[in-house]
Image: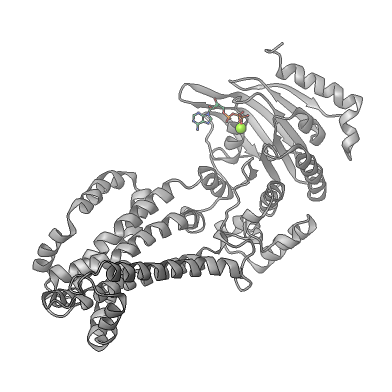
Amino acid sequence: MTRKILRNVGVPILSFVLLLLVWQWVVVGFHVASYIAPRPRQAFLAVTQNWSALWPLILGTIRETVYGFFVGAALGLGLGVIMAKVPVLQRIVYPVLVLSQAVPIIALAAPLVLILGFSVTPKVVIVAWIVFFPVTVNVLDGLTHVDKDLLNLARVYGASRWRTFIHIEIPATATPLFSGLKIGATYAVTGAIIGELAASDGASLALYQEHANANLNTAAVYGTTMVMTAIGITWFLLVVGVEVFATPWQRRTVARRWRRR
Amino acid sequence: MTLLELRDVAKTFGDTIALSPTSLAIAEGSFVAIVGPSGCGKSTMFNVIAGLLTPDGGDVLVKGERVNGTTGHVGYMLQKDLLVPWRTVEDNITMAKRLTGRVSAADREEARAVARQYGLGDFLRHYPTALSGGMRQRVAFMRTLVTHQTLLLLDEPFGALDAQTRLEMQQWLLQVWRDTGRTVLFITHDVDESIFLSDRVIVMSPRPGRVVADFANPLPRPRTVDTLIEPAFIDLKTKVMRLLHREDA
Ligand SMILES: Nc1ncnc2c1ncn2[C@@H]1O[C@H](COP(=O)(O)OP(=O)(O)OP(=O)(O)O)[C@@H](O)[C@H]1O
Ligand SMILES: [Mg+2]
């Protein structure tokens, strides 16, 4: 058990530290000018020293990411279920969904601003636009591959379609569903930042970075990138955490004690 | 009393005759084994009896009532145990209740009692992935038992087990059958198994399948490993084997 925790937590931390070391070593060893790349410490300081200015912007990005993720996940799950249950709809809707992903996200921003203005909504839409697709594809795939014999067994018991769906099909799709959610979680922040770049008029993390860049404040540029990455990783880890919690059978042999229903 | 009756039941898939018109009567409380070459329509017959398939011709009667194409009147078990990995052993046993209504405290207690009685009491809170093949099949059988169906259809339930485990499972099944007095229809490819377990051995022809012989099994119960070398056993086995391998001879 402790070995497992060490491997699952220790190794990622180690690779993170290694990354910082390489960064430090490249910048110092190759005498990289500080306006091209700062040392890790300078980037950190650029974040911590401006924390009071950054924090509201970070909150804004988190809000866009999280709202967009939930909208996208719900939409993705719904579309996946509907397409799995109504094959005719699948034939009509699926090509449209594929098409939606072929649209360059940047090119999506301008019409969204025209329609929705500069509020939080266009960013949420962009994030959801990115997130729903892997969820839909995975859910559809999961639902269409539920063991036919298991479904037949449910019929032999005299189970209704609804109960079969809730007690068999949905849990059987848990693994692909979480795969889709994890892919979505990784891209969610990217969507939020693109949205901020293309569709903000006021303050945002993306614009903060643009200003830093314009002012040749290289440390702040790198620092902001680190902050954005941290938001993405945190969100991804939260989704992984929910998966671990929601699918105990994947790594336990005995059920948790309180799991008594 | 006749529990199950098939009257000229037939099933065709496109151009394939999966089951030629077949008639059978199964007495309540009996243990009937069905053997026949692969693809002769044994599983199709079960699917028709269970109501998963509607017969193209003929009638399926349970306790005299026509049940063509309707479900909910048999317990059904396949070679694949079909345990769901996201439920514990206990919750797998109560699966049928969960799918048709509420799982009551009494249902849980019954599941625990059955598991304890048949040697899985220590595994109630385990997930199925932690169990061996034989244990999984036993859980699948308990899940079938607690549906309280009198008629149990078992389609090669031990087909995937090794010889040692299979023999244990056969003796275990006979014990459960004696305890609970259910009616069992049992498909197998193993002639020894069919004779060891049954009161009656039904032999089917190659596709399109129909019943070619219906042997009463004279062997006394309880049966032990010694049963396998009794003259009456060898005699019946010879008859069944001759029928099954007519073409090869
Ligand atoms: N759903 C189906 N659609 C088309 N053909 C089918 C279907 N189910 C079974 N068949 C065909 O019907 C015939 C009988 O199949 P069935 O599964 O009943 O045989 P079986 O006796 O159970 O064989 P085995 O001993 O190998 O399990 C086979 O030729 C099979 O290909
Ligand atoms: Mg079969």
Q: Is residue A98 left or right of residue B149?
A: left
Residue lying farthest to the top in this orientation: B249
Can residue A84 be seen in the rendering of this structure? yes
Indicate the quadrant where residue B95 lies.
Answer: bottom right
Query: Where is A229 relative to B223, above or below?
Result: below
Q: Is residue A210 left or right of residue A153?
A: left
Please report the residue visible at 88 percent of the width from the left and 36 percent of the height from the top.
Answer: B225
The total of numbered circles placed on residues is 0
Query: Where is B162 relative to A212, above or below?
Result: above
Q: Is residue A212 left or right of residue B116?
A: left
Q: Position of residue A187 (x, y in %)?
A: 30, 62
Query: Where is B209 relative to A11, above or below?
Result: above
Q: Position of residue A138 (x, y in %)?
A: 38, 52
Indicate the quadrant where residue A21 lies.
Answer: bottom left
Q: Position of residue B129 (x, y in %)?
A: 62, 54
Q: Quadrant of ligand 2?
A: top right
Q: Nearer the viewer, residue A194 or B109?
A: A194
Indicate the quadrant where residue A48 lies.
Answer: bottom left
Please report the residue visible at 29 percent of the width from the left and 65 percent of the height from the top.
Answer: A188
Q: Position of residue B205 (x, y in %)?
A: 66, 20
Q: Is residue B116 left or right of residue A163?
A: right
Please report the residue visible at 81 percent of the width from the left and 20 percent of the height from the top.
Answer: B238
Query: Where is A69 relative to B181, above or below?
Result: below
Q: Quadrant of the C terminus of chain A?
A: bottom right
Please report the residue visible at 44 percent of the width from the left and 70 percent of the height from the top.
Answer: A13
Colour basis: one colour
Q: Quadrant of the N terminus of chain A?
A: bottom right
Residue lying farthest to the left in this orientation: A114
Can residue A122 be seen in the rendering of this structure? no
